[in-house]
Structures are given as C-alpha cells and as structure tokens.
Amino acid sequence: MRILSSFSVKILIILQLSVAVWAAPEQVGLHLSFEQRLAVSYALLAHGEPAEAQEQILERAQKYLTEVATQGITKVQVRNFSEFMDQFKGDWPNTNKLSKDIELIESRPRSSLKVFESQSPRVQRQIDDYLMWQEQEFLKRAKKILKTEKVSNIALGLSAGIVSRKALLQIGDQFIAESFVLLDQIGPKIAESNLGQQQDPIMKIFMGTMLSEYFSRLSLDSKKMIASSFLGSDLYMDDFKKFEVMVQNSGPQLQKLLQIVARQADLGAELLTIFRSLENAVRPVPWIQVQEILANEKDSFKFTYFERKPLGVGTMAQVHRAKILVDGKRQDVVVRFIKPDIAERVQEDGRILAEVAALLDANPEFAKTGAPKLGPIVSDITATVVAELSQKETIQRQQLAQERYAKTVLMKIPQFKNFVEFNVPKIFESKTDSKLMVQEMVLGEKMDKAAARWKDLAPDLKRGLIEALAYHWAEEVMFKKGFYHSDLHQGNFMIQFMDPKIRLHILDFGMGGTISAYLQNQVMLLGAGTELLKPDLIAQAFWKISDQAKNQINQSQFEYLVKQRVLQIQQGQEKNRSVEHWTAWSMDQGLRLPYEFISLNRGLVIVNKLLADSGSSLTVSSLMKDLARKHPFQVYRRMVIQEKLSHQDLVKLGWGELKSLLGLKQELHPARVSNLGLVRCEGVFLSN
C-alpha cells in the first residue's frame, strides 16, 4: 500500500470538501468548491505555456494550497442551502484574465478550509447529500480524464512527485480541450436548434458562421478566461447556458454586434434574452479592481461613499453610485469608468471580426440572402468602440448635450397632456487628469415600467414620450447644430414623474457626435432623393458624403449602379428602400462612408425602432417633413439655392408651400439669401 505525503492528503481534503442542496443534487448541478476551482485553474493557466513557465505556475499552486492546508479547518454555520453554496464556491475575482484572477487570489490573506454546519437538520442533510454526490461526480470526471480508476488519492493532489503534477496538468489540458471543442461547435449547434430553424436565412448563416469562427479564433488567454468561467458555473449546464457564459465573456465588438442583432432581428425568446442582457448585465469589474481604480483617484474627487454593487455594467464601462464632497456639501453622483484591460480585447475583437466578416461576405449563400456586407458594419462598430475608449470625449459629448438637449416641450396624446422636460445629467469636473466620469445622480424608471404603471390613465404614454424624444432628436440633428446621440435605446434614458411635468433623463453619450452643416445638406438631399427615387440626387448625395479618396468605385460607375437599382425598383423587381438600406447597399458597392455618417445612420435606425416599438406610425423621415415646414428657410436655402432642387420636386416632397411660407413670389438669387435669412426666419418662428 502506497503512503501518501502529508501535502497530498491535505490537498485531497481541499479537493473533496464541497457543497449541498435538498432538491436532488443533480438538479443543482455540479459546482466546484473554491479550492477545487483554484487547483484546476492553476493547471488551466499552465496549459500551452513553455515547460519552465508551467513549473513556475505549479510551484505557485503548491505554495498557495500548502499554506491553505496549514490553516486548519474552520466550522462555518449557514442558515440555508443558498448561503452554503455561496460560501462553498467562494469569492472568485472574475476579471478579464485568468492570470489576473489568480494574482488577486494570491494577494489575499490565506483562509482555512471550511466545514459547513447548519442548525436546521433539513439543511444539514441537504449539504451532506450534495457533498457526497459532488465528490463522486468530480472523481468520476477525473477518472475519465486520466483513464484510470486510481484517482481517489494522489492523482488529484499537487505533491512534490512529478506524477501528480502531470496528473493535474492532464486534468487541466483535458478540461480546456473540452472547452475549446465547445467554443468551436456551440455556434452551429445553436443555429441548427429549433430556435435556429425559426430564423430567417440571413440570421441562420450569420449565427452559424460568426459564433463558431469568432470563438475558435480567440487568443489562448481569452479562451482560458472563458474556460475559467465554465469552471465557476454548473459543469452540467445545458447548451444555452454554456452559450450565455460564452457571450457574457466575449469581446466588446461582438457584444455590440449582438446587441444590434437583438434590436433588429426576429430571434427566439431565449436568444433575445441572452443578447439583450448585454446592454446592462455583462461581466462586471470585480470590487478589488474597482478599489485599485479609486486608490489612484484619491486626489481627483473626495468620495464619502462608494457603493460596491455596480449600478450598471456595459460592454465598455461600468457605473456605481457614490457620494462626493462639493463645496463642503455631499452630492449624490454616478461614477463611470472604462473597464481595465478592455483596450486589449478591443484590439483582438477588431482583428477577429474583420476576418469573420470577410468569410461571410465571400460566402455565396450569404450573398444570396441579400444581406448587406458585414465588413463595413464591423469596421464601423470597431471605430465606435475605439471612440468610446476615450472617457474625455464622452464627457465632452455629454457637456455639449447639456446645452443641445435642454428643452421642455408639450406632449399631447388623446388621454393625457403634459410638459416633457429633457435633461442630461450634470458633469462634475476633476482638478486632476482623472479617468473617472462623475455626474449627478438622477432618479427615474425605465420606459416600459413607467408605461405599465400609467397604462389605465394614459395608455398612449409611451408613444407620446418616444415621439417627443424622436422629434427633439431629429430637429437637433438636421435643423440645429447637428448634435446626435447614436445609441438611444431604452436602456439609455429614464422617466421621472414630477409635478407639473415629466422629466426624461438622457444618458450614456459614449456613442454620438456632431455632423457639419455640409453633411446636414447632403443627408437632407439624400432623403429627398430616396423618397423621389431620383438617381441623380441619390448618387450626388452619397458621392459627396463619401471619402472619395478611399472609394473602391469611381463616380460614373456608382452613378450607373444607382440608376440600375432605381430602374429595378420602378419595374417592381426590388422594393424601394429607406435611407438606411440605401446606405448599406452603397457600402456594398464599394463606397467608403465616414464614421460620422455611419454613426448617425445607426442612431436613425435605433430611433426608428423606438418609434415602431412604441406603436407610433411616425418615422424619422416623416418627422423631417414636419420639421421642414417649421424651418422653411433652411430647407429652401439648402435644397433649392445650394443643391438646385426644383420647385416641382419640392411639391412632390410635400414642401410646395415653402415659398408661400417664406413670402416669396419667385426664386431667390443666391446673393440675397443671407440678408433674407436675418429677417424672414425670425418672422417664420414668430408666426409658429
């Protein structure tokens, strides 16, 4: 009989002490104890590393686990099974890197092994039953991996012997191999599921290709991080739960892309839930890292309170409630910071998504679906995410929004009339070069929750509020300074009911910008061209908007293609499409459109979706027509004087009354435009 070393026995205790639950243990799932997860995570960290690095990692493992084993055993009283599970699984850092997780764990004081007890016989029995089942299942998996029955002792330890270290490495290698196979296969598996069969052809090909190719191309470090997340979950979870873990641990560009898919595609309920969770429920930055960030900001703001639980977690940033001292008084604030190490994931995601987009764009079956090319879309998402990395630019956009979006309007719906006040939270600036964005805390509730609460008194409340917001957004974009919020989904505004008005708080200016007066002209011309279906206007506007030096097609070729498409539409071979669809088509033909226009186009799509979801019959296009009547001089100057739109075209667009609104009997000479503007515009506004 072989005698085990003292270290092996202690590690055995670590690996075999575990959890419990009253519902049959298999219903709870196979969860590893904190110590079990740590032991396998060391092996996971060593996977793929050179022999010398592997040895150093295993030495760290042996040192840490030996120190834990020498702390003795502590009895822990638990009141219920849920409390036991939390204690059993322990506090895992869950950063964006497995190596960082282990470093943070090693930096903590060593805790002793735990034995769990409960004063409730029922709870104690749950614990005992689960521990027995969990140990059996864990050893069963180890036997399968090591292909031997002799694993109950030294094979799971980290003794000084080479055999046991090899055994642990073997377990880690097998686990990551299983995880890598899952990363390769889960995308097609989900796409071919019953839910996948309900999708349109575009989504089916997209899901099958994007998800399998994306995860298979991740770096070894990123794959280890996802595998580590599997270790912290139920090892027997179903495919959708595994897929959810993968998506929650994917990079920012894929998460943004899936958010777009969730807002626009007809997907099954389970997939929609997973994708929509990315808007405010992705992997949070652990508290220990938040503390490191705050320690470096002690000279920036005087915090008197900082809430540990995040108020919200996005793909790029995280926010917390806090209190700061301002002129000796405490101020409730919300603190936003960019996630640590996210820039590395942005770079990796940009590379991978560009490669996968090229595969999809070259796929003839994908092309047959009529889907827009994915390459330009991915390039735009990456540009957006890179822009969002700059906290300083986000602050500048929000400060500008405080000026541009400060307005009160009268909302009229059949059952309800009230004033709506748009508000952008105030920014508190730091005297130092801070990485934090600190803004006033505003109160409110999500749109759907507010609408449900007031449905009896004002069933059209949601529609009224969304129409007021969309009208304000469109007017600012096209008829004022050109400022826009390009991610105005429901997660980025809140409703607060006050007496006698409703406040609509607009949040998160990580995505947005300002378009120039020149671009405003071309966008307006493009809208006119697509509605009139005039190829010369469409081609002219797109060509002027584009980055002509980077276009992969010349102007005459593009004009010819536009004419051919218009002809197909007129002959009924193709549906007339919106500006958004024309934009995607133009990019497919080789036009390179600037970031500002693509970002604005995204914002337009999202606002249109808001309107549709609220039950409104309005679109941004119909709002623009109404706004044109409110701003007749601007439309006349831009379309007639500058872009040479005929009066006949104005009539077709429904703007025939512009001349009478301006008090004109004949066309103006360009030299008279500026003088007229100073007088006539004032008259128009006063008459409205």
Image (spheres, rainbow, N blue to C red):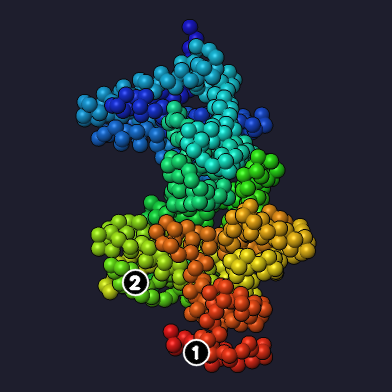
Left or right? Give the position of 613 relative to 678. left
Sequence-first disc among 2 and 1:
2
Q: CB under 8 Å between callouts 2 and 1?
A: no
Check disc 2 and report the residue beneath it.
412
Give the residue type at disc 2: Lys
Left or right? Give the position of 685 relative to 217. left
Instruction: Give the residue drawn at x 53%, y 86%.
Output: 660
Label 2 packing within 10 angstroms: few (<14), some (14-19), many (20+): some
Please state the horizontal and vertical placement of residue 48, each as a whole percent of the image: 64, 31
Whether residue 131 is visible to the viewer of this picture, yes or no, is yes
Query: Residue 215 is drawn in which quadrant?
Result: top right
Give the residue type at disc 1: Glu
Return the residue found at the far left. 120
- Residue 512's place in the image compared with 222, above or below, is below
Frontmost residue, 103 versus 98: 98
Instruction: Give the residue drawn at x 45%, y 41%.
Output: 268
Check disc 1 and report the residue beneath it.
682
Q: Which mark is residue 514?
A: none
Instruction: Give the residue drawn at x 32%, y 24%.
Output: 24
Left or right? Give the position of 479 relative to 687. right
